[in-house]
Image (cartoon, coloured by chain):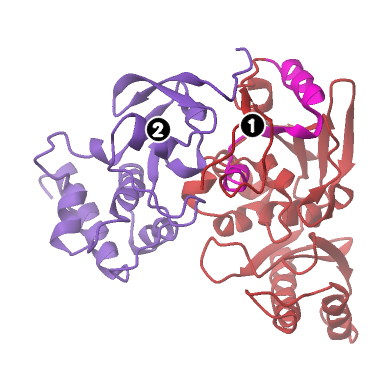
Chain colours: A purple, B red
């Protein structure tokens, strides 16, 4: 691939929430800005823009990652999933989102999309995740409202619910 | 906070990447996972004219065992090495360090060699490499060279990497049978950069203590046996030799105290593991 000029926009083809998309981005554009400003998915929030707060966390190739520490060009050919994909029906909450609501796992909601995207990976890969695993994953996120306790409770409840779903007779 | 403009190149061969770096000189930078470089770009502490993305170079994406070394290519993500099946057996020091290294969310993208290239004085991977006595393979368009870790880190976020060169791999010596390893750090928040981090090795050559977060680069010191009368004096001398400074995170005095206490704890733990 030839050298891409700084002054122009260049196509970025990737999979976003299960669909193939083509967007246009300058080399310097961050994935967080591509999602919000070019594509219009504003569920991904932008806090500190240097990788500390975790608000912009999305899933890249199945792993939780900071959209603000990723150049749009770096996801070319990759698979990106954002908070908009958690629930199939926009009118409904996913089990994890519903658990957050039930357990008051959010107040202002600014940090919530990032936290949901991290916990979604954890609960998918480790259905037996316990309090310590959840806290370990939450260490990459800042929440200034809840004090985290209700987030941990919500995640534990979602994990428990998921385990019951998988073993309906237990 | 948005990066300034730069050209972007996604080469398909290492030769193409090296040619672009040679041409770009000091204005060209390698980008791998971006977890250290993109914050620098966002804050405009780095303003390269060209970024060369090496993550599509398959040759650099390997973890290999070569003799008594584990060779980690420049495209290997931290999470990939963390999940490597024989990490605990072959690199127990790294297995102990990984939980302290950033967060799950940054390890998923950040590379091992990227952290080495960034050379933050409190970072866990440079400390581990120096403590184990590892090495860095560098390459430019014309030649390859291998530099000992202790010579690679030359100062605060400064390395021996020359213009036109890139890191091709880092070499971690494999754990030897009957050796003990330990890693501990103190930081303000889990996953933040450490105020002080200590790594220790106990083997048939004696005790070695690596210290990060105090001097402008990770440092490693041989130490007498723990039950030696001189032990406390030696570790205190080391703490005072490190050019500790006051900053907003901690005082120099606190850092020296952490060197003494964390140092003793990690050395004890490494010795216990060995026994």
The chain carrying label 2 is A
In terms of secondary structure, what is the magenta stretch mainly? helix
Q: Is residue B21 magenta?
A: yes
The quarter of the picture where residue A91 lies is top left
Task: Name the residue beneath numbered marker 1.
Answer: B75
Q: Is residue B156 magenta?
A: no
The answer to which of A83 and A49 lies nearer the viewer is A49
Is residue A162 among the parts visible in the rendering?
A: yes
Task: Name the residue beneath numbered marker 2.
Answer: A34
**SS for callout 2:** helix
Density class for disc 1 (Cα within 10 Å; few <14, some 14-19, many ≥20) is: many
User: What label sits on residue A21 in the rendered view?
Assistant: none
Up-down: is B35 above or below A26?
Answer: below
> Which residues are the magenta region?
B13-41
Q: CA distance from mark 1 to mark 2?
A: 24 Å
Density class for disc 2 (Cα within 10 Å; few <14, some 14-19, many ≥20) is: many
Which residue occupies 41% across, 39% down?
A: A32
Q: Is B20 positioned to the left or the right of A111 in the image? A: right
x then y, percent, for residue B166: 77, 32
x then y, percent, for residue B76: 62, 34
The quarter of the picture where residue B270 lies is bottom right
The chain carrying label 1 is B
């Amino acid at each position: 691939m030839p050298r891409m000029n700084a002054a122009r926009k260049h196509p970025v083809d990737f999979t976003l929430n299960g669909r193939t998309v083509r967007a246009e981005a300058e080399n310097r554009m961050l994935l967080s800005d591509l999602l919000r400003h070019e594509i219009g998915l504003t569920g991904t929030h932008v806090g500190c823009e240097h990788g500390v707060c975790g608000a912009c966390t999305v899933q890249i190739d199945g792993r939780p990652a900071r959209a603000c520490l990723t150049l749009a060009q770096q996801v070319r050919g990759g698979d990106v999933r954002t908070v908009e994909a958690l629930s199939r029906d926009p009118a409904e909450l996913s089990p994890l989102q519903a658990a957050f609501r039930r357990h008051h796992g959010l107040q202002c909601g600014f940090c919530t999309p990032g936290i949901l995207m991290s916990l979604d990976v954890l609960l998918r890969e480790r259905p037996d995740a316990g309090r310590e695993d959840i806290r370990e994953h939450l260490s990459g996120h800042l929440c200034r409202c809840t004090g985290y306790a209700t987030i941990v409770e919500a995640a534990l409840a979602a994990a428990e619910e998921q385990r019951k779903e998988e073993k309906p007779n237990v | 906070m948005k990066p300034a403009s730069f050209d972007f190149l996604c080469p398909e061969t290492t030769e193409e990447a090296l040619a672009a770096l040679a041409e770009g000189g000091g204005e060209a930078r390698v980008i791998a996972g971006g977890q250290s470089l993109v914050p620098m770009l966002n804050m405009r502490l780095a303003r390269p004219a060209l970024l060369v993305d090496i993550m599509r170079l398959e040759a650099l994406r390997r973890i290999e065992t070569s003799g008594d070394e584990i060779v980690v290519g420049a495209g290997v993500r931290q999470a990939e090495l963390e999940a490597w099946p024989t990490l605990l057996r072959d690199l127990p020091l790294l297995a102990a360090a990984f939980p302290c290294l950033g967060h799950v969310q940054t390890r998923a993208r950040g590379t091992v060699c990227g952290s080495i290239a960034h050379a933050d004085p409190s970072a866990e991977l440079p400390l581990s490499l120096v403590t184990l006595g590892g090495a860095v393979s560098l390459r430019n368009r014309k030649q390859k060279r291998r530099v000992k870790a202790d010579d690679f880190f030359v100062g605060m976020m400064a390395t021996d990497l020359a213009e036109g060169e890139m890191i091709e791999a880092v070499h971690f010596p494999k754990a030897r049978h009957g050796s003990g390893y330990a890693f501990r750090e103190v930081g303000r928040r889990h996953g933040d950069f450490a105020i002080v981090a200590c790594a220790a090795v106990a083997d048939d050559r004696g005790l070695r203590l690596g210290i990060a977060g105090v001097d402008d680069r990770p440092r490693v010191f041989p130490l007498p046996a723990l039950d030696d009368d001189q032990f406390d004096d030696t570790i205190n001398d080391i703490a005072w030799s490190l050019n500790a400074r006051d900053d907003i995170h901690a005082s120099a005095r606190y850092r020296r105290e952490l060197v003494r206490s964390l140092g003793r704890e990690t050395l004890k733990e490494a010795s216990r593991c060995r026994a």
